[in-house]
Amino acid sequence: MKLIEKEIVIAADGKLPPDFREAFGRKARVSVYLQEQEQEQTEDADILSDIVGKIRAFRGIDDPVSFQRELRASWDRSWDK
């Protein structure tokens, strides 16, 4: 028995890449190991890294800590009503 082992991303259509061509049309045992959440978190971090500095919504805030305190204080006051 021969083992073909590759780390790949399986295409959305579910087809195996050409690296597995010798297994096409033959009886084979397939094992699939999926990485846990760590993979998805890395992808999310990459997406966030791409947009860092591009969103300018809070550019006018000189003191972010003070801004957050005032915002939280307004939330606290809204509960008192």
Image (spheres, grey):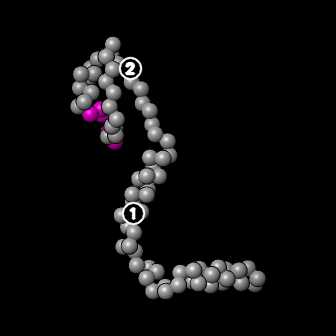
Left or right, 58 with reference to 13? right
In the picture, residue 15 is in which quadrant?
A: top left
Residue 62, percent across and down?
49, 86
Q: CA distance from mark 2 to mark 1?
A: 39 Å
Q: Which residue is mark 2?
A: 29
Q: Residue at x 66, y 84 (%)?
A: 74
N-term-proximal mark, 2 vs 1: 2
Depth check, front residue: 24 or 45: 45
Left or right, 46 with reference to 65? left
In the picture, residue 81 is in which quadrant?
A: bottom right
> Where, quadrant-wise, is the N terminus in this rendering?
top left
Q: Residue at x 49, y 85 (%)?
A: 61
Crowding near pointer 1: few (<14 within 10 Å), some, many (20+)? few
Q: Residue at x 23, y 31 (%)?
A: 18
Residue at disc 2, secondary structure: loop
Q: Residue furthest right?
A: 80
Q: Which residue is mark 1?
A: 49
